[in-house]
Image (tube, rainbow, N blue to C red):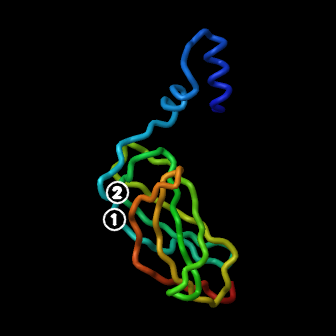
Amino acid sequence: MNKSFLAISFAMLGFTSSLQQVHAQISPTTQRASTVRIIQGPSVEVAKDFLTVIRWTTNNPGGSPVHYGVVHYGTDPKSLSQTAKSPMRLDPTHSSSVFRVRLYDLIPGKTYYYTVSSTESNGTDDRVRSAVKQFTIPAGL
């Protein structure tokens, strides 16, 4: 539901809640984890020329409710100059968080190298990064 609509609705109903209070009820910020660790992956979930999905799981990083999974990738393991990121919403009741990042239009037959990380929606780094891994897009799909 639109936050502005909620704020207007509350005002019309005579509530004195501010938009920040409404936002806090909809999307609570949770305590940040002292250390964020990758507990599974990263691995390639799908590898096609038009769509590749990289997946990994961390302990729940906490902080803002929206985080971004980030994949730094390229065809040279020493120059991961391309970046893809996908948003996800944390569930504060879960002890872990699954990130899935989509990469588009990769070249068939080409080997790509990548590393993963995550950030809060405000750009605060979760201070976790995987080792460099690799995958090849199958040719002739």
Check disc 2: other Cα within 10 Å, few if <14, some if 14-19, many if 20+. some
* Residue at figure coordinates x 46%, y 45% from the top left: 64
Quadrant where the C terminus sits is: bottom right
Q: Disc 1 marks which amino acid?
A: Ile
Q: Position of residue 118 (x, y in %)?
A: 47, 61
Q: Position of residue 54 (x, y in %)?
A: 52, 70
72 above or below 4?
below
Q: Position of residue 61 (x, y in %)?
A: 38, 53
Q: Nearer the viewer, residue 91 or 117?
A: 117
Q: Is residue 137 left or right of residue 116?
A: right
Mark 2 or 1 closer to N-term?
Answer: 1
Q: Is residue 94 left or right of residue 100?
A: left
Q: Which mark is residue 126?
A: none
* Residue at figure coordinates x 62%, y 71% from the top left: 103
Provide the secondary structure element on which disc 2 rests.
strand
Q: Which residue is mark 2?
A: 59
Q: How many marks?
A: 2
Q: Which residue is mark 1?
A: 39
Looking at the image, which residue sits at the far top?
A: 14
Q: CA gap, disc 2 to disc 1? A: 7 Å
Determine contact: label 2, label 1, CB under 8 Å: yes
Quadrant where the N terminus sits is: top right
Looking at the image, which residue sits at the far left?
A: 34
Check disc 1: other Cα within 10 Å, few if <14, some if 14-19, many if 20+. few
34 above or below 16?
below
Q: Residue 79 sits in which quadrant?
A: bottom right
Q: Disc 2 marks which amino acid?
A: Asn
Q: Position of residue 2 (x, y in %)?
A: 66, 32
* Residue at figure coordinates x 54%, y 31% from the top left: 23
Provide the secondary structure element on which disc 1 rests.
strand
Q: Residue 106 sits in which quadrant?
A: bottom right
